Amino acid sequence: LDATGATVGDVVADVSARYPELGPRLSDGKGNPYPFVTIYLNDEDIRFAGGFQTAVTDGDELVVVPAIAGG
């Protein structure tokens, strides 16, 4: 998906506004990232780069990896 925003949080908010059913799966009710959903910005885990406050620029790629459990 193409999305706009200055930070990862802005991009998540943009996608969540366009796809409301996806929003609750990307962030909690307070707008914070879930600890069990890993988001990568250009192959870097945002948890170690500033979380949703991490700056993004045109052409960056975000990859969302939900937790997978089972056996």
Image (cartoon, helix red, strand yellow):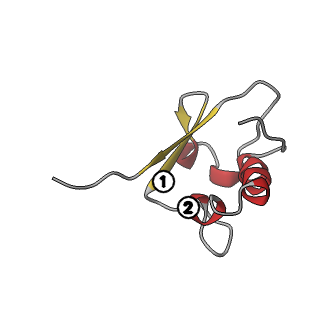
What amino acid is at disc 1? Val
Q: Nearer the viewer, mark 1 or mark 2?
A: 2
Q: Are marks 1 and 2 in contact (CB under 8 Å)?
A: yes
Above or below: residue 68 compared with residue 59 = below
Q: CA distance from mark 1 to mark 2?
A: 8 Å
Residue depicted at x 74% and y 50%: 15
What residue does disc 1 label?
Answer: 37
Residue depicted at x 78% and y 54%: 18
Label 2 SS: helix
What residue does disc 2 label?
Answer: 25
Tell me where residue 71 appears, x and y as whole percent: 15, 52
What amino acid is at disc 2? Arg
Q: Is residue 17 toward the left or the right of residue 48 in the image?
A: right
Residue depicted at x 54% and y 28%: 43
Tell me where residue 16 appears, x and y as whole percent: 72, 57
Tell me where residue 23 appears, x and y as whole percent: 65, 61
Q: List the single residue furthest toward the top.
A: 59
Residue nearest the viewer, comparing 2 with 9: 2
Q: Earlier in the sequence, mark 1 or mark 2?
A: 2
Label 1 SS: strand
Kindly indicate the quadrant of the structure image that contains residue 57: top right
Tell me where residue 24 appears, x and y as whole percent: 60, 66
